[in-house]
Image: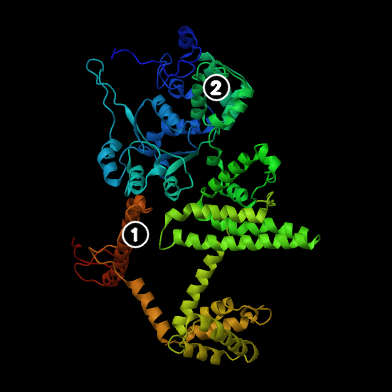
Amino acid sequence: NPYRRPANPYGGGKKASPAKKTAAASSMGGGLASVSDANALWADKYAPSGVHDILGNGDCVKKLTSWLASWEKNFLHGRGDSRHRGALLSGPPGIGKTTTATLVAEASGRSVTAWNASDCRSQKGLRESLGDVTGSHVLAMGGKKGRPAPARRRCIIMDEVDGMGAGDRAGMAELVKMIKASKVPIVCICNDRQSQKIKTLAGYCLDLKFRRPIKTIIGRRAVQVGRLEGISIEPNAAEAIAESCGNDIRQVLNCLQMWSCGPKGSAISTDRVTYMEVRDRMASIGKDDMLRVNIFDATKSIVEGMRGMPAPTGENEKRGEGKKAVKNLYRRLDSYFIDYSLMGLNVHQNYLKVIGPQYLRAKSGDLEEEEIVLDRMADAVDTMSNFSMVEEKVMGGDMNWSLLPLCAVLAVKVGHHAGGEQGGFLSGYPEFAGWLGKNSSRSKKRRSLQELRHHLNFRVSSDLSQLRQYYLPLFRQRFLQLLKEEEDVDRAIDMMDEYGLDRDDLFEHLEEFHCGASGKEAFDSIDSKKKAEFTREYNRRAHKSQALVDEQASMIKVRGKKKVKGESAPVDPDAIDDDAGMASEEDDESDDDKDFEAIRSMFAKKKKGAGTKGAAGKGKGKGAAAGKGKGKGKAKK
């Protein structure tokens, strides 16, 4: 029969009676699907149907309810904080952010309009779909005779805003613009709160950070759901499932539903869940724990190598230890992909800290053991060098991403050599990559050196390396001699003008490139009075070095440059204008300034005229203006 109802795919377990389900429907959800529907997902059947059914995050729910209830009063009819016109709900997936936003909006009597990652959310798409929605209400039919039904208020929910990428061109900037001018509350939801575009959006929203509910609350609700579905679940088993799923409520319900439809005739019972059975099936029902590993834990897992694994002997292979070693290897390879752009730098920062204590122990013992540790250190350094070359092919100009798995293998190989056959130990917390800070300082010093070369270019012909090694030490020594020993300020300034150096070059850049210990031979050790005298004399003079004149001319040109009408610089489509929301206020302030200037000039003119008229009014002429003088005629209007 082609029209017969398909079989229930979840019908393997014993179900509770329909009467029992109906009696508990009001308190156990049923918001997205009917509780009596045997084919529905449990996550839909037992979804919260009201605000009181939401698990955890009670403080965030109260703040969102209060914000939404007073939105029109604060932002349309009052003077609320304009930077909180929107709301941002952030947190890990599966904890009820979207459900909370929907239920709170519906509880306040609003019509919910939702957009997620499956919708087009580019600048053009948002304007076309939300342009009219942000300034309107929903019409309601069926009012009483002679009285139209009151219009329902709207609420817009933008889900997964952290997923607005290249496909949603300029979407984030348009969303912020809409939040500033919208007459309807907009609730944004994201998972990655640390994303740069989310940080910009958070400045215009009420920031609500959701957390995972604790396992006891999830376990209690799981036991209630299992009772309604005819499954007896031990409380400690429910908490173990919640912990293995990372406190993800959806994942817990999906695991229980899959448990209930187990194969017939299997040794595992489908109508009873015990702690021992959960422990045995933890790997098959749990959530991937690599999703909860941060970059520091991943770094420690890689550089410690085979820590916790037995030595690869024949007896251990017979006991099945080889499978555990392979699993440990795969786990370390997965750890590299937590953040492959930074993992190599973190491994480079920490792998010698693992092998260092091993060398100190071996140094105090047998010489042969010390040589073994040194050989492993050499192998680790050599592998780290190979990793650097391969990563350059991946991240450099070639962009050969097929070599990325090889980078992961080489990073794990570095940890294997550092830890040894039985693994090493990294004491303390892994350090973050120090190369980033050193590279930033290097770039800053390189810019300073290029500026010095530009100033000296008219008198000194050299590259950056020669300038750094040969010229700057002599300049520093000579200027210190003039200012400290001879105390000849005039000759020092004349020498600076001759070579095109300014005051910052003398007191900052020359000292910055000094390698030895400064001590008493530093510009900071010069007497403050002598420095003040030098500064006054330097500022009094005119410096005609070509490099300094060009810099001063360019600065004056930039300051005095007027914006040509019709010209505009290229605009980043995803850039957000933080001052756009204050445009009207700035215009008002500029108008107030103009009015004040006009009034002040008007009073200044009147004051001046009053003085002349008063002087003339003291005589006895006709037609004088009103004053203390005695005019015979009437004052003309």
Contact? badges 1 and 2 (CB < 8 Å): no
Provide residue 338's location: percent of width, then percent of height: 52, 47
Question: Which residue type carries mark 2?
Answer: Ala
- Neighbour tally class for label 2: few under 14, some 14-19, many 20 plus, Cα within 10 Å: many
- Neighbour tally class for label 1: few under 14, some 14-19, many 20 plus, Cα within 10 Å: few
Q: Label 1 belongs to which residue?
A: 593
Provide residue 473's location: percent of width, then percent of height: 58, 84
- Tell me the quarter of the image containing the N terminus: top left
The residue tagged with tag 2: helix, strand or loop? helix
Lateral position of residue 259 relative to residue 429, left or right: left
Taking the view exactly as shown, the residue that stands out farthest to the right is 365
Provide residue 108's location: percent of width, then percent of height: 40, 26
Question: Which residue type carries mark 1?
Answer: Asp
Pick the front one: 493 or 457: 457
Pick the front one: 465 or 103: 465
User: What colouring does the structure picture have?
Assistant: rainbow
Provide residue 199's location: percent of width, then percent of height: 45, 48
Q: Which badge, 1 or 2, is on the more N-terminal residue?
A: 2
Residue at left offset 49%, top offset 31%: 61
Asked whether the viewer can see residue 433, the reply is: yes
The residue tagged with tag 1: helix, strand or loop? helix
Nearer to us: label 1 or label 2: 2
Q: CA distance from mark 1 to mark 2?
A: 65 Å
